[in-house]
Amino acid sequence: MMKIEKPPVPLIVPNPDDPRLTERVLGTDQHGSKVEIRVPVERPLTLYLNAQEIVTMMTIGDYPEYLAVGYLLNQNMLRYDDVVTEVEYHEDLQVVVVRTEHHTDFEQKLKKRTQTSGCAQGTAFGDLMEAIENVVLPKAELRTSWLYEMTHAINTMPSLYLEAGAIHGCVLCQEGRPLCYTEDVGRHNAVDKIAGWMYQHGVDPADKIMYTTGRLTSEMVIKTVRMGIPILVSRSGFTAWGVELARQVGLTLVGRTRGKRFIALSGQERLVYDQNLDYVEEESARHRRKGEARDD
């Protein structure tokens, strides 16, 4: 697949007005009154790598090609030196097929693992851990002025979350500027879409920041490291293993980023404190998410 020198314009942003992504549902509220709300959809998407069926994912259905390629990359099923010749999406079948110039290493591993135990997850997990063991992340810096600039921009940008809730978002940023903003029912899907977008457009990860609305788990750390991005930021909290893995690989991990507040638990050497907090606004109630108080 041909790569281009610069990301496409306009960059990806959520489209809360896309009628395919939400449905209107009738219900009753705490007073017994009838209400109508918008809720995100979930659709199955079956992924094939060449002729091998890999997984069926539940997704809101936008950017299936990016999701498919990003999933394969982040699961180490597709390597960055594999040549992707075609990504084919069949909307009527809800199937996406990623074709490569030659069969990949993972297809044979998956076939063997499926024949012996009926489950390839152990193989996939082992490959993932091996893939990040010797990773050297790029040197970079995270200025606190960029951090506040990008979180304010993300919080005030139109999104499915603000319209319908029950959704996670991931945003690829450069300095304080959001470049690519994706949403899905799972944060893993949202970050995989960004991975696919970066790969297909030849985007350099060295000076980028990954932002997520979800928890900073081991999964999010592994995916960010696989993508070669040196900084991971969240408005939510941490898991112990996520922190441990981040420290092992030198990933800058910043969480509970809301209003003026944030906490860095790994890679603090990349932080540059250049923002006067007197000029930073607290976050409005509209942008708070369910359960966040438990992270404080």
Image: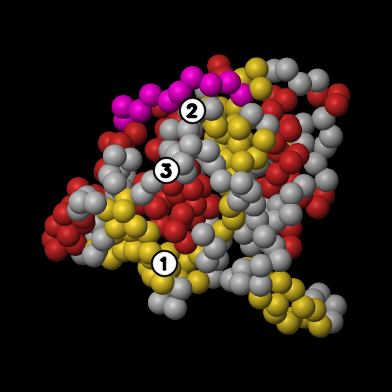
Q: Which residue is mark 1?
A: 89
Q: Callout 1, which amino acid?
A: Tyr
Secondary structure of residue under mark 2: loop
In the image, residue 228 lies at what x, y percent? 43, 33
Indicate which label's residue lies in the foreground, 1 or 2.
1
Q: Residue at x 59, y 55 (%)?
A: 183
In the image, residue 252 lies at what x, y percent? 53, 27
Query: Does the CB distance between marks 1 and 2 fall below 8 Å?
Result: no
Residue at mark 1 to residue at mark 2: CA–CA distance: 30 Å
Q: Is residue 140 magenta?
A: yes
Q: Which residue is mark 2?
A: 206
Residue at mark 1 to residue at mark 3: CA–CA distance: 19 Å
Q: Which residue is mark 3?
A: 3
Secondary structure of residue under mark 3: loop
101 to 179, vertically: above or below: below
Q: Residue at x 66, y 75 (%)?
A: 23
Q: Callout 3, which amino acid?
A: Lys
Q: Earlier in the sequence, mark 1 or mark 3?
A: 3
211 to 267, vertically: above or below: below
Q: Is residue 50 magenta?
A: no
Q: Badge 1, how many Cα within 10 Å: few under 14, some, many 20+?
A: some
Residue at mark 2 to residue at mark 3: CA–CA distance: 17 Å
In the image, residue 79 lies at what x, y percent? 30, 43
Which stretch appears magenta?
133-142
Classify residue 109 as left or right of residue 295: left
Indicate which label's residue lies in the foreground, 2 or 3.
3
In the image, residue 134 lies at what x, y percent? 31, 27
